Image (cartoon, grey):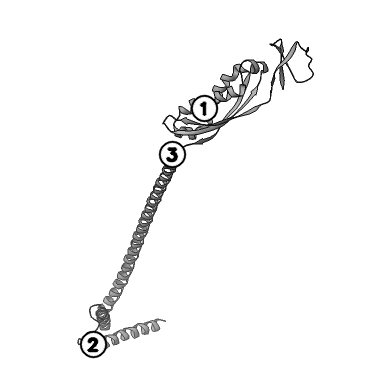
Amino acid sequence: MEYTVERFGRYTHTLRPGLNLIVPLIHTIGHKINMMESVLDVPSQEVITKDNAVVEVNGVVFYQVLDAAKAAYEVRNLELAALNLTMTNIRTVMGSLDLDELLSKRDEINARLLNVVDDATAPWGVKVTRIEIKDIAPPKDLVEAMARQMKAEREKRAVILEAEGERQAEILRAEGEKRAAVLAAEGRKEAAFRDAEAREREAEAEGKATLMVSDAISRGNVQAINYFVAQKYVDALGQFANSPNEKVFFLPVEAASVIGAIGGIGEIARQSFGKSAGQS
């Protein structure tokens, strides 16, 4: 605490904490000033924003007296003066903002209020250290409208995210199908290459067999002709029997010719084996 001393009603000096002496009857104590930081509650008040929304606002002010003489003699009822000054500037600052800015820029509002109120109270020997807006309460119908707007915005984002997910899934599915088609085409290409190679080998083997039969015929071996004809005859019968259009068929088959051809095949085999044994 600090005390202001008056001589016949006129301020003379300030008594600091500690031992102080004054002359009775001549000197009197004018004011007792609390020099500690103090808290001042700002009651709720209605504020009209820039977009004509009515909100209720309350807050708190932290201040400290730096000069006891100024606080005692420059203003009457310091707390009431600081309170009214703060409430007036709250309406001024918050009335210049839209509701959305009012709800989202609370730190900026606090800083602007602090600068204005601190400058205004400086002649009173007071330092305003902090101003905080505690509550901003819009009307009930406005809160409900904001809740519906927020819900609609969230549903919109959910629909957009779902659509993005479906689009990404379609892209990935298309890429997978494309990759599968490419792999299938490569597989068919490889299979066709293998089939062509197999047919080529088969044609080479058939050509060698035909060449061997031709050599045997040129040497006068009639059984080679019978072998060749019997092979083609038996292949034709097998293809006809495996035809999907007919499961049962009747035709004159010369069994004797087939048996004779088979006998010719056996004769060729015996001759071949006989030659091999003679050479060994």
Q: Amino acid at mark 1?
A: Ile
Crowding at dot 1, Cα within 10 Å, few <14 / some 14-19 / many 20+, comes out as: many
- The first of marks 3 and 2 along the sequence is 3
In which quadrant will I find the N terminus?
Answer: top right
* Depicted 111 relative to depicted 280: above or below: above
- SS class of the residue under badge 1? helix
- The first of marks 2 and 1 along the sequence is 1
Q: Specify the farthest residue to the bottom.
A: 256
Q: Amino acid at mark 3?
A: Leu
* Depicted 254 relative to depicted 41: above or below: below
Q: Position of residue 138 (x, y in %)?
A: 47, 37
- The residue carrying mark 1 is 90
- SS class of the residue under badge 2? helix
Residue 220 appears in the picture as rendered: no
Residue 142 disc label: 3
Q: Position of residue 104 (x, y in %)?
A: 49, 35
Q: Amino acid at mark 2?
A: Ser
Residue 39 appears in the picture as rendered: yes
Q: Quadrant of residue 75?
A: top right
Label 2 and label 1: CA atoms lie apart by: 122 Å
- SS class of the residue under badge 3? helix
Label 3 and label 2: CA atoms lie apart by: 107 Å
Residue 257 disc label: 2
Q: Specify the farthest residue to the left.
A: 252
- The first of marks 3 and 1 along the sequence is 1
